[in-house]
Amino acid sequence: MLQYLHSSAKNQQIKPLEHLRAGSWVRCERPNEDELAELLSLGLDNDLLSDALDPHEVPRLEIGDDWTYLIARLPDTDDDFNDFTTPILFCLNKDYAVTLSRDSLGRLWQPFIDQARSRTDRPVELLVDMIDAISRQYQRRVAAINRQMRAATDNIHTLRVKDIATLAEYERKLNDYLDALIPMNWAVEKLLATSGLRLRADDKEDVEDLSIDLEQVIARCKSLLRTITNVRDSYRAVMDTRLNETIRLLTVITVALTIPTMIAGLFGMNVPVPGSEDPLMFWKITIVSIVAACALGGFFLRKR
């Protein structure tokens, strides 16, 4: 899909165009060969276009002769509701802003197009607003993970194996987010030192604010990962304590049962024993065995 969009100082509502003109945003998603050829006709680097279609591409900033390239990663959800991050390439020069992605990003860009008041004829401003939209996506997803974690770990003593598996899934998501956010923040910070973009004072301030927002999301992800580690360690300690208590109880039961076992073995020998002629001896032995076993078991259970 290849689409031309435009907005300006007079009309900041982003609207589609029939034909490309200066000051436009060129939006390309899941491109075919003809659409890639049209992007190359604008003077874009073929290698960087290929990199943007690599699902494992790492965010970075590249400076060309006429174009500035920034590869970022944004969070998305597939048809099976699995979260992942996907790469997107931002290309800027004095006339155009180009975005290229291997996946359809309608869930991100359509609300941006409907609500944003960005000027496509100011590519740097448009870039900052786009990355800010991506940052807000991360913020919402991290906040959702935080809420779900609090609900799942409200009481450490009631945690189940299923809850620990859920925490492992949250850990995977947060690590994926960090793998995208940390290099993306480095790339954004490098924008401040890029002379080719000719950042104005307000643009520099916006980029600095954006970097601060990304750093806050990164710090939140790291905090949640530490929380997951602490919960897992606490769960392991609780389970170890429960296991030790179970083993201790079984040991006490085993020791307590040795007394009636010894008495039964003694009176079960095929030799005369004291009291063998007493008709009540069986019940006496039984009562003595039970009392002795309970006394021994109670002694060990109270001794901690």
Image (spheres, grey):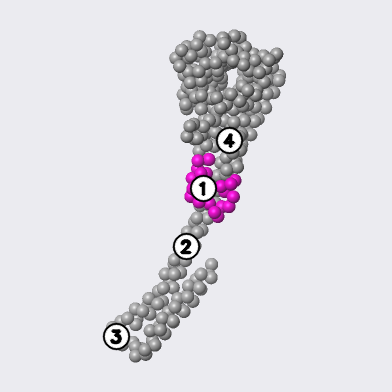
Q: Which residue shows up at 51% across the image and 47% down it? A: 163
Q: Name the front one of labels 2 and 1.
A: 1
Indicate the position of residue 8 as horizontal and vertical percent values. Answer: 67, 14
**Classed neighbour count for the residue bearing mark 4: other residues with Cα under 10 Å, few (<14), some (14–19), many (≥20):** some
Q: Which residue is mark 4?
A: 141
Give neighbour class at mark 2: few <14, some 14-19, many 20+ (Cα, 10 Å): few
Q: First in sequence, mark 1 or 4: give its number.
A: 4
Disc number for residue 202: none
Q: Is residue 245 above or below residue 12?
A: below
* Residue 162 colored in magenta in the image: yes
* Residue that numbered label 1 is attached to: 163
Measured along the vertical axis of the image, is residue 160 above or below residue 81? below
- The x, y position of residue 205, in whole percent, is 69, 23
Q: Using the image, determine if residue 79 lies above or below residue 45.
A: below
Residue 40 visible at all: no
Give residue 271's mark. Answer: 3
Reading the image, the residue beneath label 2 is: 246
Residue at screen point 59% across, 27% down: 134
Earlier residue among tags 2 and 3: 2
Main SS of residues in magenta: helix
Residue 237, x across and y down, in percent = 52, 54
